[in-house]
Amino acid sequence: MLIRICGAKCVGIEAVNVTVEVSIDRGIGIHLVGLADVAVKESLLRTTTALQALGYHIPGKKIVINLAPADVHKNGSGYDLPIAIGVIAASEQCALPYAGKYMMMGELGLDGSVRGIPGGLLFAELAGQEGMDGVILPLDSAMEAAELENTKVYGVETLNDVVRILSGEECDEMLVTNSHSPVCKPADIPDFSDIIGLEGPKRGMEIAAAGGHNIAMIGPPGSGKSSLAKALVGILPPMSREESLETSKIFSIAGKGSLRYGLIDTRPFRSPHYSASLAAIIGGGGGDGIVPGEISLAHNGVLFLDEAAQMPRSVAEALRAPVEDRKVVISRLKSKVEYPSSFMLVLASNPCPCGYWGVGDRCTCTPTQRLNYLSRLSGPMMDRIDIHLSVPNISAAELKRLKSAVTPEPSSVVAARVKAARGLQHRRFIGENINSNAEMGNKHIERFCLLDEECNALLMSIMERMGFSMRAYFRIIKVARTIADLAASECIRPVHISEAASFRYLDRVGTVRF
């Protein structure tokens, strides 16, 4: 008897159909075909043991299991569940009239339990697109898809639960629904009001959040660079439904999506160590098992690279294309996968090897050492950073004075201004396939960032005096457009140009070559 069970596999951030065909006929032996990797081939022993543990028998006949299409590599342990159901249905040990109407994936334990797998959200989305009656997944994996509409998602814990669903029993208690309340801001995100002083860097962070601009911070140890980077997440605008779904799919593929119930609705903040490998940052893996790296896990959020000057040169330079294209393409001999990677890049670095250049006379580095240190961040890479911030070290006496004299704005007030500026940009870019000022190309700048004669003369004067590159020219205009949006100004004014140019700090200091 021939039975077909619907499964799937992930390719990038999409899922594609895989049909598990099980045929039982005269003969002997169990045969698995269809370009399966080692993990899938091992499923035969797991599946047969799980079936026997639950009281099912393995037919003493020839069992052929085909994973179609046969020219696509299959990987992972998720095919255990459809294979087991296929054997039960093909051997007619149970009547499963709905076996072909549900998509199912899951790993089996030797006792018949069902364990979580990566990609649950993508499988549920595909089942809805294909018009299937629903999708059956391990409970943890099913939780990722709780907020999907028009798709019945069943969360199961054992193989017997799946048999009950496919036999037509009422199993509404296994349906996974969205019952969680909105997630509050994580407690480890600092509030802007907790950061005393540093009004200039905080202003730069606000502008960066309002326009989605990349940032580089230079300052001595303990000056507050990490706190500023973490506080940035607290002022970013809420995620849209599309952004939430896309980010959740990436986390689902990486096996990190079932840590909470439903879609991810807080912007990710990724902070890999500076010694992380190229594959960890960009993504990688063997064969078809290509998983997203940190730049994709930071999609629609923040990628914070502390001690950026200490990063291996090859890793730092590999960020050029993703920062510019907002996607990463990972190629292998027999496969190529594309992941989105639209993130805000935040770099932080000390000004010199010892870290104390500019702090009194504490620096012990030579001018050559200082030059070589920050020059590890190449000119082409730094040209892709819109905002450069100098983060000074505040003395204890000055900090005490500021605490009593100044009442800093909380993140909620700053976030309201950022949200209003992003709303202006959303309306401005309708139909343009971009969402923020940072994503504008030269054609968008010519259309949406018109400069009057006074602004143009001021910008030309700054360019000549500071020796900025043409890429810096366009970066200044984009940042000026964001500053104008924060001020609710329809036009870019000279004051906006002046403030935007002040954030090209690293283009002017004599210790960095571009």
Image: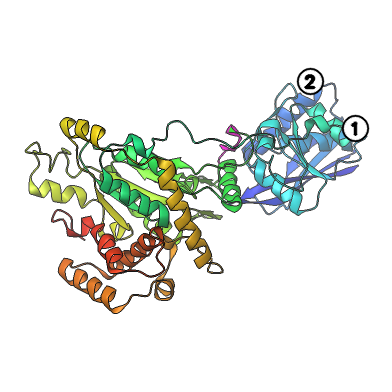
Kindly tell me whether residue 332 is visible in this rendering. Answer: no
Residue 35 image position (x, y, % from top left): 67, 47
Residue at the disc numbered 2: 53
Estimate the spatial distance between the alpha carbons at disc 1 and disc 2, rounded to whole Å.
22 Å
Q: Residue at x 68, y 54 (%)?
A: 71
Q: Quadrant of the N terminus?
A: top right
Q: Quadrant of the C terminus?
A: bottom left
Q: Secondary structure at mark 1?
A: loop
Quick one: 54 or 433, which is closer to the camera?
433
Residue 483 image position (x, y, % from top left): 35, 60
Q: Residue at x 35, y 48 (%)?
A: 346
Q: Earlier in the sequence, mark 1 or mark 2?
A: 2
Quick one: 272 or 476, which is closer to the camera?
476
The amino acid marked with disc number 2 is: Ala
Residue 258 magenta-drawn? yes
Range covered by the magenta-colored residues: 254-259
Q: Quadrant of residue 444?
A: bottom left
Kindly tell me whether residue 86 is visible in this rendering. Answer: yes
Q: Secondary structure at mark 2?
A: helix
Side (left or right) of 119 relative to 59: left
Q: Quadrant of residue 21?
A: top right
Residue at the disc numbered 1: 169
Which residue occupies the extreme front position in the image?
Answer: 405
Disc 2 crowd rating (10 Å Cα; few below 14, some 14-19, many 20+) is some
Quick one: 36 or 295, which is closer to the camera?
295
Side (left or right) of 1 relative to 71: right
